[in-house]
Image: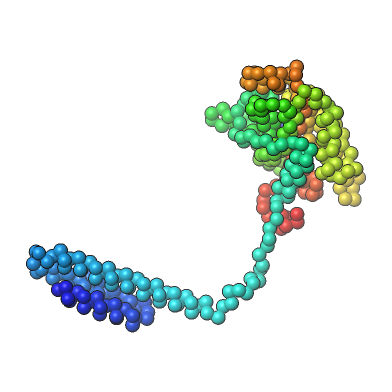
Amino acid sequence: MLTQLDQLRTQALAELETLTDETALETFRVAYLGKKGSLTALSSGMKDVPGDQRKEVGAKLNEVRDAITSGLTSRQEALQQAADAKVADGIDITLPGRLGVGTGSLHPLTQIRDLAVRTLRRMGFALADGPEVETEWHCFDALNTPADHPARNESDTFYLADGRLLRTHTSSVQIRTMESIKALPVRIIAPGAAYRRDEIDATHLSVFNQLEGLYVDTQVSLADLKGTLEGFFREIFGPKTVVRFRPHFFPFTEPSFEIDVKLEAKGKEARWIEIAGCGMVDPAVFAAVSKTRGDDLLHPDQVTGFAFGMGLDRLAMILHGISDIRHLIENDTRFLAQF
Ligand code: PHE
């Protein structure tokens, strides 16, 4: 039986080499490995093999079946490869495609964020960061925002089941930074996403982008605030840009301002455009932070500071004359290719 098996293997493998199509391979498979195939027939002879030889014959049987099976598989693959090569024959795969491949570019929002960050870093601000899922403490309480403030309303804010929320502004990074710093001064900027339950329209999205700034030291003044932000907006919009500070209210700054820049769209008369919020850090914020810190580094009697926040989407829209904020998230390459 051992000899028969060896012969069968030699015969099968030799036969395989002569087969050139799928049908022949299938016939081969049935003839050798099928229910009535020759290998199957041989293995039914196992029952007549004397007990002491069974092990050896059984092993040989498996060996031959494996050899034929894998021979069949590699023959199939070889035939497939040959067929594929034939199809590709005559096609010049080095010929450039007719549509061409675009090189892509940075999203206008990314460009603006990079420009703003680059400019402020040159002015001495370092990058800071904080989570988008925030505690009410970091988003509101520590920022002197009372429980009945409209920003805290469930209809204006995305709350999670555990009481945390999607931050409504990047000002939470002010608190996180002041809670963790080891020494003065604090001079940070924090670009990032903010979330509000706004009706989506040409000027509102429920996810938008802000850039926060904070400077705290022993003698920071309103003059520092004005100089820094005027300088910044002249870098962004051009050296002759007129910037004005209009009194406003934010719970966490006092006094507070909105910043307008005077800009003229092509062919139109110059207009004041609101671009950022800012102010001197309210002593109540220093008091809240000092309480969690448990030290006097940021005691309201020791330090002063200014903070500002601006919408990056808005900045991009103004700078590029984009009329609808939704363009910024639709990823239509006909729009994006313009920047
Ligand atoms: N957080 C304010 C907003 O989202 C902006 C702001 C930041 C105002 C810092 C003053 C100081 O509208």
Image quadrant where residue 41 sits: bottom left
- Determine whether, in the image, residue 289 is placed left or right of residue 232: left
Q: Looking at the image, which residue is at 66% across and 28% down?
A: 181
Counting from the top left corner in percent of width and height, residue 290 is at 67, 20
| Residue 139 visible here | no
Across the whole image, how many numbered discs are drawn on residues?
0
In the picture, the quarter occupied by the N terminus is: bottom left
Q: Looking at the image, which residue is at 85% across and 33% down?
A: 227
Q: Looking at the image, which residue is at 76% across and 45% down?
A: 115
Image quadrant where residue 196 sits: top right
Counting from the top left corner in percent of width and height, residue 88 is at 52, 77
Q: Looking at the image, which residue is at 32% across and 70% down?
A: 70
Extreme residue in the bottom direction: 18
- Determine whether, in the image, residue 6 is placed left or right of residue 52: right
Nearest to the observer: residue 287 or residue 2: 2
- Determine whether, in the image, residue 205 is placed left or right of residue 77: right
Counting from the top left corner in percent of width and height, residue 8 is at 22, 77
Image quadrant where residue 13 sits: bottom left
Nearest to the observer: residue 250 or residue 64: 64
Extreme residue in the front direction: 183
Q: Is residue 40 above or below residue 154?
A: below
Nearest to the observer: residue 141 or residue 2: 2
In the picture, the quarter occupied by the C terminus is: bottom right
| Residue 129 visible here | yes
Extreme residue in the top direction: 301
| Colour option used | rainbow
Counting from the top left corner in percent of width and height, residue 211 is at 72, 38
